Image: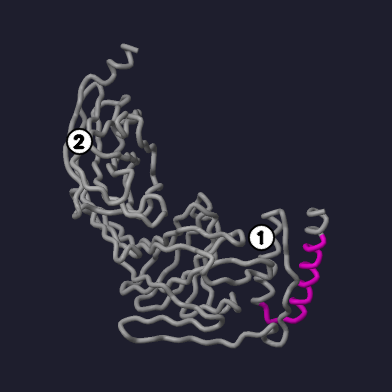
Amino acid sequence: MSSIANLYTVNTTISSSLTSNSSIFNRNSDLNRYYFEGFQIRVRSNGSYRFLSISSVDTYGYFYLGSFNPALPYQNLLISDDDSGGNAQFQFRYFLETNQTYILVFTTYSPLVATNFSLVVSGLISVNITKVNYNSSFVNGTTFSSSTSTSPTTNPTLTSGYSSALTINSRTYTRYGSSGIFYYEAILITTSVSGNYTIQSNSTIDAYGYLYLNSFNANDMITNILAIDDDSGENGQFLISYTLQANGRYIVIMTTYFQNITAPFSIIVTGPAIVSMSYLETISTTSTTTTSGSSTRSTSQSSTTRDGGFWTFPPIICKSRKINRFLMNFERILLASSSKQFKFDIIISIFIGLFVNFILTK
């Protein structure tokens, strides 16, 4: 035990405080807001270091490699801790390397708690601790924007966020012919700067995302679609990368892979500029949004058949996720095709898939 204790003989301490003017982030996708401060850590010698908070409140600590994005609190995360230091203080140990940059984030267990605090980093030698300035704010607890800067600042990536929740009162639709109910929320996105933007979900559920241009009709999932994604964001989150045009009208559909799922969520957009995100009301085949006193409405006719040659499908229920995606891809091809013969060939393939599904689910 004494040999372990000897690893932490030199303490480096920094003191600060969380106030109502501190940066804010959404820590758990639970719609709550937490004050935080971030500190850059650099070491002059490889080795094990101990991190301890000292405060009169219940603290929470996060440790990151390279950088910390308040809109994506689990990106680059190495370790986090709540109460290992005793007296509701966080404490953890980690092996640090001289050629790496680390970020220590101090926050609280409960939302919007202001407090004075100190951080103590212990090792065989002292470490370099520099406060990182984050600009972040929530508007009505729903949307937020943030940018990160360290000295010197070099073209920080701008991040915009939108927080909400899928509930039993959310809009519903039926996806690619499957039975059951899928809750969804439509979010209107606009930007004043053209460029490549990344749109990512942040939630505790298996999310599914769609990106549309101009309008969205829940009874016609193909028209105006630009991109679809399921798990590219890892941890069951969708991630869509797309070049958005200035003053364009884009609609993100946040929904779930499995039916009848409700949960809080955030939509994170990163790119060359802050984007505007707002809830888009959708009613059957009509979608409306109001911005600065003006209303935009798009309407499309719904029917069980379209284009004189589209068929509706019997419900596809499959225990195998891979087969479900296999069938879904066939249906996308069918809906996008203008050839009746090609559609007929795909229909035959669909029924073969359904037969395989029936055998597997017996």
Question: In this figure, which residue is indicated by the disc labeled 2?
Answer: 118
Badge 2 marks a residue whose secondary structure is strand
> Which residue type carries mark 1?
Arg
Q: Nearer the viewer, residue 262 or 237?
A: 262
Badge 1 marks a residue whose secondary structure is helix
**Colour scheme of the rendered structure:** one colour
User: CA separation, marks 2 and 1?
Assistant: 51 Å
Q: Main secondary structure of the magenta part?
A: helix
Above or below residue 5? Residue 206 is: below
Q: Specify whether 229 is left or right of 269.
A: right
Q: Residues within 10 Å of mark 2 (few under 14, many from 20)?
A: some
Q: Specify whether 181 is left or right of 245.
A: right
Residue 258 belongs to the span the image colors magenta = no
Residue 340 belongs to the span the image colors magenta = yes
Magenta stretch bounds: 337-355
Residue 319 lies, in percent from the top left, at 72, 54
Residue lying at 44% horizontally and 56% vertically, measured from the top left: 202
Question: In this figure, which residue is indicated by the disc labeled 1?
Answer: 325
Residue 188 lies, in percent from the top left, at 42, 74
State the image quarter where residue 17 is shown.
Answer: top left
Reading the chain from its start, which is encountered first: label 2 or label 1?
2
Above or below residue 245? Residue 235 is: above
Question: Where's the N terminus, which quadrant?
Answer: top left
Residue lying at 39% horizontally and 37% vertically, measured from the top left: 79
Residue 337 lies, in percent from the top left, at 67, 78
Residue 162 lies, in percent from the top left, at 38, 64
Numbered disc total: 2
Give the farthest residue toward the left. 15
2 or 1: mark nearer the eye: 2
